Image: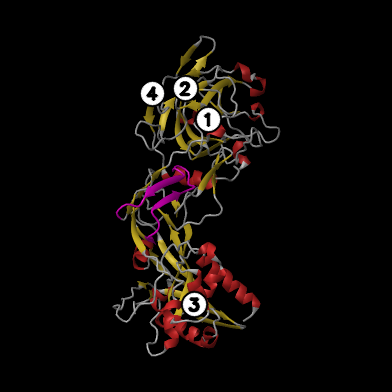
Amino acid sequence: MSTNIRIYLKKMVYGLLALLLVSCTDSDLGETINGGDSSKQLCAISEIGTQTVSFNLKYDVPEGYRVAFEVYKENPVEINAGMIIKKVDVSPILTGVTNGKGEYDLSRSLSEQVKEVYVYSSYIGVPPLLYGKIENGTVVPEEIEFSESAETKAISRASNNFPFYTLGGWNSLGKPDYVSKTEKISSSVLQAVNKAFPEWKKANPEYNKRTDIYVEKDAEIWISMLHSGSLFDNVLGYFTYEGDIKNVDPNSIHEIIAFPRANIVRLFSSGLKAGDAVQLKYYNSKTGKYQTTFPKGTSIGWVIRTDGYSLLRRSVNEGLFRFYSYPEWNPESGNKNHTVLFKKDNFVVVGFEDLPNEWINYMKGDGDCNDLMFHVSSYPEDAISYEIPEIPDGGGDIDGTEEVDGIQPLSEILDLPDDDPFWSDLFVASKSTYTRKVSDNDAPESYGSVIGVKDELIIANSKTMESLIVDQGPSIYRAFVKTTIRKIATKADPPKKKKFVKTTIRGMIVYIEVDDYDDEYMGMNAFSLQRDVRGTLIQKINSAREQLQNNIPVRIIVEMEFEPVPEKEFIEILPVGPYSPFCSFNGE
């Protein structure tokens, strides 16, 4: 066998076996590697059962806004320098997309060792992390409230005695008692914002060329919460000025608090919600009074105080940092932009970055300007739409893949000859992926469709498979697979009826790699092709009989495209891989 192929095969199998539960003693493994009976040849490969878990996941989003998410068996995020960071060394155990109602109500197959799950999403308008315990076969993931560490809170803050004014009071969760209405947020707006301002990607500078609101005619002004994606309890304030802001002294502004705690709170009914709106008031410096009408020619600037609200004291303070919509007032030496201003149709939005663009006090932001986003509206409606850039449409197809790893007897996936002992000792290590597509045209109840699969299979006898496990050393002995590992069935076990996904196959490629021999089989006829796929796999494995008997593993790749199959139907029939042997045109 060529060196390159063996290295590749080992790397692929090691990736699978890093999830494998191994329960034998070192002496048992030694006996197995050195020969011994067939029962001992199986002792390194232990069975881990599966559980069917019903997900009851619900995001509070407008109809038509589908949310892509990932599910983990451990917390996939960490807090670093005041930011929520996704870990790079963890992989999801499954992925999904909600239906058009923001719901995911499907049953999935997980390892029986998974007792809790974390659900992560980077989408705008939803909490980044949910958590749930699996109880009685059901999990109901709920939002996790993040809070900064004691070390972060210990960073020196400026004096709390800064001058500010309020529009009223607020409750214990920081929700203003002057919330006057709740505005509806359309799915098209969320889709467009989600596409234009993805998490952890610097905002397009096109949208921070101008960030203050200019009032073209006498108008009443409201702002409402759209999204909060920050670790901190930020304070949102505003101020007004006339003429060129370059002539304004920042120490002279009349700062008014609009949202004392500009965080969307989903866990409690009395917290601030997306769409909650407050009416701003204009401070007339000539009369010393507040009025509901902003005069023509007035400009509205914004200020965010990072972590400037104390839940314990129910009060506003200076905060860790103070950033303005006018860049020149911000503390950085280089990029000073902290806000974006844009619109989708007539829906005007301001977005804020709440951490510095360079390292200050051991903190630095990512510049995505989606830590706080709020909608600005006016009456009359056209009073504030002057020269605000438009973001493109969002939506469109949501493409994704899901990967499942596992090891099982070859007899679990293929009907093997009964009269040949060669077949009874073969295992298959698989890395199986299916491709998902969700379209805007799908029905609201739909979770999208599966349009293709790819199975990467390593075929080996039990001795070879076991030796690959042993080569990894004892560090993997207590790890576990995320789907299942099954032992060889005995003659007393009743035969299992195999289930098939019925569809029309558009095309398939079977590729085998062993020693220095490569072979490729391609077919495009859906009728003859799919009746032939399992036979083709057996034929390819049989052609490598000599190598397998000489303890050389065989790698087979099967790629298949087919007419869309509803994902709900697909995973009900095929909860785990490999998939290709069970995708059939007519179920035969």
| For the residues bearing labels 4 and 1, Cβ distance under 8 angstroms | no
Q: Residue furthest front?
A: 27
Between disc 2 and disc 3, the foreground one is 3
> Which comes before the other along the chain, label 3 or label 1?
3
The question of residue 128 being in magenta is answered with: yes
Name which residue type carries label 1.
Answer: Asp
Query: 271 or 398: nearer the eye?
Result: 271
Q: Gap between marks 1 and 2, in whole Å? A: 11 Å
Where the C terminus falls, by quadrant?
A: bottom left
State yes or no: discs 2 and 4 in contact (Cβ < 8 Å).
no
Q: Amino acid at mark 4?
A: Asp
Disc marking residue 315: 2
Q: Helix, strand, or loop for circle 3?
A: helix
Dot 2 amino acid type: Ser
Q: Which mark is residue 32?
A: 3
Question: Depth check: 212 or 566 in front?
Answer: 566
Does residue 456 appear in the picture of this structure? Answer: no
Give the residue at mark 1. Answer: 307
Q: Compared with residue 306, is residue 556 higher up or lower down, i.e. above or below?
A: below
Q: Label 4's element?
A: loop
The mark lying in front, picked from 3 and 1, is 3
Q: Which residues are magenta?
A: 109-136
Quick one: label 1 or label 2, which is nearer the N terminus?
1
Disc 3 versus disc 1: distance between alpha carbons?
Answer: 60 Å
Q: CA distance from mark 4 to mark 1?
A: 20 Å
Instruction: Tell me whether circle 1 and circle 2 mark residues in contact (CB < 8 Å).
Output: no
Q: Position of residue 283 (x, y in %)?
A: 51, 16
- Which residue is the site of mark 4? 177
Q: Quadrant of residue 417?
A: bottom left
Q: Residue furthest bottom?
A: 419
